[in-house]
Image: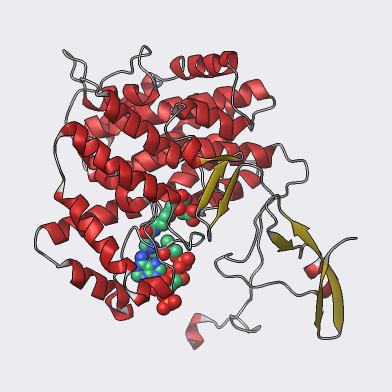
């Protein structure tokens, strides 16, 4: 028997279908509400609204659970490589050996940039924000791969996905090299995904960067942890743009723009600024906590809190442990980690944070590890985007392949002027 929710108002009485998710979560389907009543729902940040049905990622915010295609994140971060997880998210299952080999080869065959695109880096200001470069260059791929503006079959889609996932590293590394006045380092197809990125970032023309396997593994773990997170702001943006049948390059470029925000992926940059300010003696940890609690301060404890996780973000837990492993490897201990731990300790015993169920999120520790790798702070959100790209592509594909999907076009509550006439300038 169909489960329903009764809604009565203004003489209307509706039975709204209730949909149950794979893990028992319930959604009241209001798809017919406006047609039957002329009323819409108001849910300003969509915190109570399911944008779509999806089979890609499951999050349980109360229990701190994160699964990619049903596999717990804890079972993924230490074993397979990032390319394998990208395939899992996009195609819905773990690839067999041939599939993974074919996809890896497609990445290797598509890691160079078109020379026209490469030359554009010469005209970018050396202090340009890397996220501005990234969103522009991902969108620019549409100029050089016009045959992929519409993807009619899996082969075309897979090529577009491979070009994005492979070239995003090249674009990111080139923007870093440009910012440092260094010659660009071309990709080396003999290297695995993460090693190749570190090579393009840190090698010099006469000597390959000496890759530490532990550092490569840590970057692989960071990319996997960031690979998808259901309907977060940037993924919902990719879906919204893609719902208009915009191409994959444009949709992912839009995702980069949303991710840039300091409340979203940009938080990993803000966390380091906050920790550096404390490390420089500009602020005590206790002052930082006080400011975060003071609504008038306009200050937030970046890297803390989450719309969905009301428990410890499982990714933050893994990243916190990874910090120790990386520092042991490079035999350097960044004081920022001790400051981060102190802030966490103060917050988690403070009723303001406890009552609001504010815990460290993925951005709280990720920057400390990226810093230990020598990646500059302004590239942290770019690294987040490299990790999140397979998730954006997976969601774009899921929506693109769904024959019932429609253009995303929400309504509003209009509070503007009632009808009035035009007033000629002479009478104003
Ligand atoms: C990411 O959605 C995703 O999945 C995102 C992400 C992904 O993988 O895609 O997980 C990645 O974006 C992680 C979040 C990174 N952002 C930050 O670390 C920025 C700091 N955090 C906050 O701005 C905030 O917690 C958000 C943006 C993450 C969540 O915002 P919400 O759900 O809108 O929560 P809210 O602003 O309504 O806060 C609820 C209460 C408020 O206090 P009251 O009005 O109830 O008194 O908690 C307070 C907020 O003031 N609060 C904080 C706080 N976060 C929430 N107070 C101080 N410091 C904070 N960090």
Q: How is the image coloured?
A: secondary structure
- Measured from the top left, where is residue 298 in percent x and y? 30, 73
| Location of residue 399 by image quarter | top right
Compared with 182, 51 (above or below) is below
**Horizontally, is 149 left or right of 368 in the view?**
right
- Measured from the top left, where is residue 60 in percent x and y? 56, 55
Name the residue rendered at 66%, 39% in the picture: 398
Q: Nearer the viewer, residue 373 or 310?
A: 310
Q: Nearer the viewer, residue 348 or 2?
A: 348
Q: Is residue 135 visible?
A: no
Q: Nearer the viewer, residue 61 or 63?
A: 63
Q: Where does ligand 1 appear, by image quarter? A: bottom left
**Horizontally, is 76 left or right of 284 in the view?**
right
Name the residue rendered at 20%, 36% in the picture: 328
| Location of residue 123 by image quarter | top left
- Measured from the top left, where is residue 179 in percent x and y? 21, 36
Name the residue rendered at 20%, 23% in the picture: 183
Name the residue rendered at 30%, 18% in the picture: 186
- Measured from the top left, where is residue 370 in percent x and y? 27, 40
């Amino acid at each position: 028997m169909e489960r329903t929710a009764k809604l009565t108002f203004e003489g209307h009485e509706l039975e709204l279908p209730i949909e149950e998710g794979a893990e028992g979560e319930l959604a009241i389907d209001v798809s017919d509400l406006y047609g039957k009543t002329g009323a819409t729902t108001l849910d300003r940040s969509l915190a109570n609204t399911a944008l779509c049905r999806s089979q890609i990622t499951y999050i349980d915010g109360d229990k701190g659970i994160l699964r990619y295609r049903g596999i717990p994140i804890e079972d993924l971060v230490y074993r397979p490589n990032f390319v394998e997880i990208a395939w899992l998210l996009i195609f819905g299952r773990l690839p067999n050996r041939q599939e993974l080999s074919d996809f890896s080869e497609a990445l290797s065959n598509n890691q160079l940039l078109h020379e026209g695109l490469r030359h554009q880096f010469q005209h970018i200001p050396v202090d340009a924000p890397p996220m501005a470069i990234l969103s522009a260059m991902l969108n620019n791929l549409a100029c050089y791969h016009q045959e992929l503006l519409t993807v009619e079959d899996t082969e075309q889609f897979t090529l577009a996905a491979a070009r994005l996932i492979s070239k995003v590293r090249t674009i990111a590394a080139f923007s870093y090299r440009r910012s440092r006045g260094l010659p660009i380092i071309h990709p080396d197809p003999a290297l695995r995904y993460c090693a190749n990125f570190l090579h393009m970032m840190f090698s010099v023309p006469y000597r390959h960067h000496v890759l530490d396997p532990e550092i490569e593994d840590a970057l692989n773990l960071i990319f996997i942890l960031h690979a998808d997170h259901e309907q977060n702001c940037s993924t919902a943006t990719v879906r919204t743009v893609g719902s208009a049948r915009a191409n994959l390059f444009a949709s992912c470029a839009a995702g980069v723009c949303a991710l840039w925000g300091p409340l979203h992926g940009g938080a990993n940059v803000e966390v380091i600024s906050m920790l550096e300010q404390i490390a420089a003696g500009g602020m005590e940890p206790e002052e930082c906590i006080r400011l975060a609690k003071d609504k008038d301060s306009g200050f937030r404890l970046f890297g803390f809190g989450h719309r969905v996780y009301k428990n410890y973000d499982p990714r933050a837990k893994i990243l916190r442990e990874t910090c120790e492993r990386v520092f042991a490897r490079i035999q350097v201990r960044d004081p920022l980690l001790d400051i981060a731990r102190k802030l966490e300790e103060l917050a988690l015993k403070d009723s303001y944070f406890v009552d609001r169920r504010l815990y460290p999120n993925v951005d709280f520790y990720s920057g400390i590890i990226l810093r230990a790798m020598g990646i500059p702070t302004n590239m942290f959100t770019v690294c987040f985007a490299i990790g999140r790209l397979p998730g954006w592509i997976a969601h774009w594909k899921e929506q693109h392949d769904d024959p019932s999907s429609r253009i995303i076009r929400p309504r509003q509550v209009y509070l503007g002027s009632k009808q009035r006439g035009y007033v000629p300038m002479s009478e104003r």
